[in-house]
Image: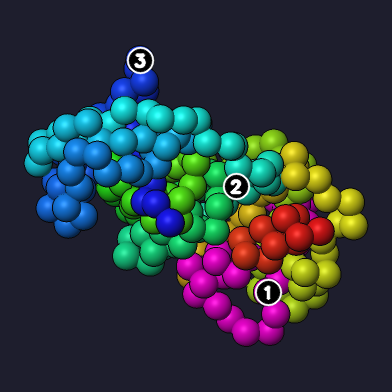
């Protein structure tokens, strides 16, 4: 199976990769003229052949446009900020599972200062999402949004809204799924911090469906992966 890479743009049937990606292609993958890969401009995917290859720049010539991927439900993960090593792991795995957007926010029990520090991590987080998208052969890189306010996260539009809650009265996510599911749906998942939701936050969940992932207490990043896997399978295999 051919490797896939993202390019900024395709003009007149040609595209280029520079910087770290070019060095990776030429040094790690031994890329050279005549070799074929798949490239995406974050929309369409093409079969392309390398015209010129160097450590600073690799130039591709497109050969044919490939069929678009099947339509999938749009997944949005609104995740309370946690320690950055765990948050970055969450970004990587959520990207592999097909999330379309990740919206970080500071919850009442998030560690202080994470929201301010997160703004300085935006470029790194987008690079992680890019690399995970290439590895998992996605056609598009998920959007990594700037840290949002809790109120704005709650008001974001979606066809289905699920908030993960440790409350034992919350039904399991898999039992809360609607019978009618469309691949045009936008599904939002709201994930709390390591310390859980505060009572005032829980009072704001009126327009969200409270669900759980079972009796075990999961780390935030584990809960994100479990919920996204359930939702992706439920909509794609309905």
Residue 208: say if magenta: yes
Q: Is residue 197 visible?
A: no
Q: Quadrant of residue 70?
A: top right
Q: Residues within 10 Å of mark 3 (few under 14, many from 20)?
A: few
- Give the residue at mark 3: 12
Along the viewing direction, whichever of 197 and 51 lies nearer the viewer? 51
Task: Please tell me which residue is depicted at 82% across the width and 64% down the height of the picture.
Answer: 176
Q: In this view, which residue lies farthest toward the left?
A: 55
Instruction: Look at the numbered discs 3 and 2 and tell me whether their residues touch, using CB distance below 8 Å.
Output: no
Q: Position of residue 27 (x, y in %)?
A: 12, 53
Q: Secondary structure at mark 2?
A: strand
Nearest to N terminus: mark 2 or mark 1? 2
**In which quadrant will I find the C terminus?**
bottom right
Indicate which disc, 3 or 2, sits on the residue closer to the N terminus. 3
Residues drawn in magenta = 202-227
226 part of magenta stretch: yes
Residue at numbered disc 1: 213
CA separation, marks 1 and 3?
49 Å
Q: Mark 3 or mark 1, which is nearer the start of the sequence? A: 3
Q: Disc 1 on helix, strand or loop? A: loop
Q: Residue at x 55, y 50 (%)?
A: 99
State whether residue 160 appears in this view. Answer: yes
Within 10 Å of disc 2 (Cα), the crowding (few <14, some 14-19, many 20+) is many
Q: Pick whichever, 41 or 159, lies toward us.
A: 41
Q: Is residue 9 left or right of residue 143?
A: left
């Amino acid at each position: 199976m051919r490797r896939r890479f993202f390019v900024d743009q395709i003009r007149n049937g040609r595209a280029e990769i520079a910087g770290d990606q070019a060095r990776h292609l030429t040094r790690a993958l031994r890329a050279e003229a005549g070799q074929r890969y798949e490239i995406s401009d974050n929309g369409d995917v093409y079969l392309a052949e390398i015209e010129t290859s160097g450590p600073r720049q690799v130039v591709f010539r497109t050969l044919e446009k490939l069929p678009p991927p099947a339509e999938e439900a749009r997944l949005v993960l609104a995740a309370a900020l946690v320690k950055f090593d765990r948050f970055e792991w969450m970004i990587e795995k959520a990207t592999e599972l097909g999330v379309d957007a990740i919206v970080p926010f500071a919850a009442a029990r998030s560690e202080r200062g994470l929201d301010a520090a997160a703004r300085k991590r935006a470029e790194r987080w987008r690079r992680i999402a890019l690399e995970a998208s290439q590895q998992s052969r996605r056609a598009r890189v998920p959007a990594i949004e700037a840290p949002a306010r809790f109120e704005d996260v709650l008001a974001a539009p979606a066809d289905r809204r699920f908030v993960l809650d440790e409350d034992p009265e919350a039904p399991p996510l898999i039992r809360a799924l609607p019978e009618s599911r469309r691949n045009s749906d936008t599904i939002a998942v709201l994930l709390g911090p390591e310390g859980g939701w505060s009572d005032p936050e829980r009072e704001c969940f009126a327009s969200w469906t409270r669900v759980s992932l079972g009796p075990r207490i999961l780390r935030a990043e584990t809960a994100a992966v479990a919920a996204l896997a359930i939702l992706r399978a439920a909509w794609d295999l309905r």
